[in-house]
Amino acid sequence: MKILVLTAGLLLFVSCKNEKDKTSPKESASIDNSVVKKDSVKADITENPIDQIKKEYAVLQAQLEAEKLSSSKFSYDCNDEPSGEVIFHSDKDGIKVIEHFYAEHSHFSASEKYFIKEGKPFFIFRQETVWNFDGGTPEKPVTKDEITETRMVSSK
């Protein structure tokens, strides 16, 4: 096992060295461009991607709560299939959040929120609810909800 790890590390080192050797000194880059690249790399390294997603999520969530985004929606009903509603929240730059709520004619419903940055979803929050009868009387039945939350982030 140690040999495998050492071999993989050696291959990585050699391939990185070969990539560096392939760049010729004839390639010219302006000083300004190299500074920008170094600064952007430092910014990416110092900020945790999860923290960045949390910040972007918080901004969009605050805009939703303050009703600063315009919205349009449509509903659908597929008879024996799920029925639901889709809401698009946007600003002058485009769609920022898509909300999708749907329910089946049984004991299931779900909601999904797609948070969008630069035209692509960066975070998806999904909540599924399944409910069942859990005692009570026929006149006053008691129900129990089982809620499952899923959080997904996009891979770059």
Image: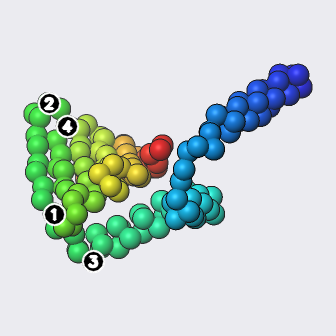
* The disc label shown at residue 82, or none: 4
User: Alpha carbon of mark 3 to alpha carbon of mark 4: how far?
Assistant: 30 Å
Q: Position of residue 155 (x, y in %)?
A: 48, 43
Amino acid at pointer 4: Pro
Q: Considering depth in this image, is 1 or 81 the residue closer to the camera?
A: 1
Q: Considering depth in this image, is 20 or 151 the residue closer to the camera?
A: 20
Amino acid at pointer 3: Ala
* For residue 47, side relative to residue 1 (left or right): left
- When the figure is inspected, residue 47 is found, relative to residue 17, above or below; the finding is below
Q: Which residue is mark 3?
A: 66
Callout 2: SS:
loop
Q: Which residue is mark 2?
A: 80
* For residue 156, side relative to residue 99 (left or right): right
Residue 21 appears in the rendering: yes
User: Alpha carbon of mark 1 to alpha carbon of mark 2: how far?
Assistant: 28 Å
N-term mark: 3 or 4: 3
**Number of callouts in the render?**
4
N-term mark: 1 or 3: 3
User: Alpha carbon of mark 4 to alpha carbon of mark 2: how far?
Assistant: 7 Å
User: Alpha carbon of mark 1 to alpha carbon of mark 3: how far?
Assistant: 13 Å
Callout 4: SS:
loop
Q: Considering depth in this image, is 41 or 104 the residue closer to the camera?
A: 41
